[in-house]
């Protein structure tokens, strides 16, 4: 599978070129266009693997869809174009046996060799991290595509690093994080507009997004007509 | 070495001597140019890349505020790249890849090189994508300026693809027809007149096609004129030259056209009913230039062998293509239509034949359904 990222960073899409027999699993609704030599299959499981009802439900809680779409090329040089719904970037991450924890709605597509599973982050984190209840755990090896709201930047964490809630895209599972207050006093942190933050520790890579959808939504909300 | 510049978009190439006398397709604008053996005048001396801004800054990224007046003085984005990089991008016609092989990258161009280095699968072992490189490579492609000259006008599409804006220059006496509110600014030599165009039938056809009843006519009355046009949403603008053939435009995609082009509504029948995109497509035909816009970037795709596009992402397509609206193939026949109901891909346009399709990379619908969640609830 070869890929190209087009129209970055705001209108990004990933163009995948696949050979016969190659297969990719995509988020529901991600397909924009494709050549005619694809077989499309909708299931609640990972391709050819485990899963089923429980995993589908977990995915739902993680902000993804219950179902997954599998695209399998039936001829050589087939092209598939996928992209996220909102404005933002797409990132390619080659997974090589390691594990990446992806924020619920940031997962876009992954190759067959990658096992995707929703993981529970613990009650405190779920409630206060500003992210979903569940995270998507990607392990195995192959191409992984993530999307963000706004642009994505990478941070090499060695020791500690602080990210505002809602801005996490993905991080290596070698990192731990806990939710804490930004300043020394809770009142001060809240008045400062930063409220709670995610504090990472350990060693590994962290990917953040420049914007977060809830902030934008709260900006828009009051100006929209009541439903 | 031969040094040439594309006569249409001024993109420069350096080619081996053996290509002298041959013809090549410009990677920038797609026009065919002939390669003349040039006297060995040192080509680098003539490069506009000597502009310090263009030479040092990241390409294209930092030339945002080109006002209409000095826009012409700013060198095209791609010349900021070292000339050696663009060398390989002018392919002699004899060796040109068939125009329609698979999906060519958006506006092709010098970026193939960039993508080859950053877009290869795998990357370095243990390595995650290297952000800075990626940004630069993609920025270079994204903000490439498209320009061209036709019988009717001269155009330049810049700030692509996020905030595309078109600058059009027309000689005295010429006209442009545009949808209301597309105009951003213009020189005082332009005269603007709003009115119905093309009689009752065409006017209502446009209305059904999601466009306004009114068409603004811009006439260069007192000397040559210049108009800037932009779309309503953040997104891209694409250009197409009609030579007697027709182009279908999705609801709301129409922006403006030159003389010689007729824009009318075309009833799509059941196809339109099921596509969820409106019953009527706009049909542009004649001989002239047409510009259309999108939400998101526009990716042109040359179809030779069947192509499938989600209905919400079609911007325009050539009349030479047949299309039908269907659920994803392979699911119908097997009696499984699960993808249709649960797969979220809904309905797709299945194209057949040979021609070009323009696809947008985002759809307004997705944004709206997301924003809907933030609407306040009615208080009672």
Image: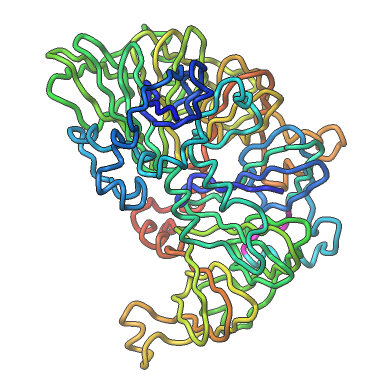
The location of residue A138, given as percent across then percent down, is: 70, 67
Q: Is residue B152 above or below residue A111?
A: above
Magenta-span inclusion, residue A7: no
The location of residue B371, given as percent across then percent down, is: 46, 53
The answer to whether one can see residue A86 in this image is yes
Q: Which residues are magenta?
A: A63-68
Q: Quadrant of residue A176?
A: bottom right
Magenta-span inclusion, residue A64: yes
B152 with respect to A36 (left or right): left
B116 with respect to A161 (left or right): right
Q: Nearer the viewer, residue A39 or B30?
A: B30
Q: Nearer the viewer, residue A113 or A181?
A: A113
The location of residue B227, given as percent across then percent down, is: 24, 26
Q: Main secondary structure of the magenta part?
A: loop
Residue located 69% across and 70% down the image? A137
Q: Nearer the viewer, residue B162 or B9?
A: B9
Residue located 40% across and 39% down the image? B144
Q: Residue furthest bottom?
A: A184
Q: Is residue A87 above or below residue B87?
A: below
């Amino acid at each position: 599978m070869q890929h190209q990222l087009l129209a970055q960073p705001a209108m990004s899409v990933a163009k995948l070129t696949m050979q016969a027999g190659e297969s990719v699993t995509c988020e529901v609704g991600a397909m924009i266009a494709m050549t005619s030599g694809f077989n499309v299959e909708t299931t609640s499981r990972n391709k050819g693997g485990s899963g089923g009802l429980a995993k589908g439900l977990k995915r739902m809680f993680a902000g993804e869809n219950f179902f997954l779409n599998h695209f399998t090329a039936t001829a050589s040089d087939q092209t598939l174009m996928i992209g996220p719904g909102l404005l933002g970037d797409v990132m390619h991450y080659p997974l090589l046996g390691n594990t990446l924890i992806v924020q619920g709605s940031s997962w876009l597509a992954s190759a067959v060799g990658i096992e995707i599973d929703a993981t529970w982050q613990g009650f405190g984190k779920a409630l206060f991290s500003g992210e979903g209840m569940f995270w998507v755990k990607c392990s195995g090896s192959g191409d992984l595509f993530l999307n963000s709201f706004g642009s994505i930047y990478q941070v090499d964490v060695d020791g500690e690093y602080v990210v505002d809630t809602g801005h996490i895209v993905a991080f290596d599972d070698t990192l731990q994080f806990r939710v804490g207050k930004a300043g020394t006093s809770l009142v001060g942190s809240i008045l400062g507009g930063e409220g709670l933050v995610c504090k990472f520790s350990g060693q590994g890579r962290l990917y953040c997004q420049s914007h977060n959808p809830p902030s934008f939504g709260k900006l828009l909300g009051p100006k929209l007509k009541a439903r | 070495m031969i040094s040439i510049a594309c006569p249409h978009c001024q993109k420069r190439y350096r080619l081996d001597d053996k290509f002298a006398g041959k013809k090549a397709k410009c990677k920038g604008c797609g026009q065919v140019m002939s390669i003349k053996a040039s006297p060995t005048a040192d080509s680098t001396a003539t490069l506009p890349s000597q502009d310090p801004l263009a030479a040092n800054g990241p390409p294209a990224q930092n030339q945002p505020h080109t006002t209409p007046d000095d826009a012409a003085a700013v060198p095209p984005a791609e010349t900021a790249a070292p000339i050696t990089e663009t060398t390989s991008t002018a392919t002699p016609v004899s060796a040109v890849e068939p125009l329609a092989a698979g999906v060519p990258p958006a506006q092709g161009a010098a970026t193939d090189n960039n993508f080859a280095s950053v877009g290869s699968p795998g990357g370095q072992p243990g390595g995650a994508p290297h952000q800075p490189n990626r940004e630069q490579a993609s920025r270079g492609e994204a903000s490439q300026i498209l320009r061209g000259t036709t019988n009717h006008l001269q155009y330049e599409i810049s700030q692509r693809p996020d905030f595309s804006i078109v600058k059009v220059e027309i000689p005295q006496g010429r006209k442009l027809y545009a949808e209301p509110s597309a105009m951003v600014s213009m020189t005082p030599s332009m005269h603007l007149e709003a009115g119905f165009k093309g009689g009752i039938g065409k006017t209502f056809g446009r209305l059904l096609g999601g466009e306004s009843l009114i068409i603004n006519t811009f006439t260069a009355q007192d000397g040559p004129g210049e108009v800037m046009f932009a779309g309503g949403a953040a997104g891209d603008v694409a250009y197409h030259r009609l030579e007697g053939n027709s182009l279908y435009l999705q609801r709301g995609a129409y922006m403006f056209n030159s003389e010689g082009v007729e824009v009318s509504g075309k009833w799509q029948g059941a196809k339109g009913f099921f596509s969820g995109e409106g019953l009527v497509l706009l049909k542009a035909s004649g001989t002239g230039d047409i510009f259309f816009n999108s939400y998101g970037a526009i990716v042109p795709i040359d179809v030779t062998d069947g192509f499938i596009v989600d209905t919400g992402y079609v911007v325009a397509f050539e009349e030479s293509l047949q299309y039908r609206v269907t659920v994803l193939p392979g699911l119908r026949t097997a009696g499984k239509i699960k993808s249709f109901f649960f797969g979220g891909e809904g309905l797709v346009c299945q194209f057949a034949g040979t021609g070009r399709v323009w696809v947008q990379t985002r759809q307004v619908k997705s944004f709206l359904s997301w924003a809907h969640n933030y609407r306040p609830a009615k208080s009672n």
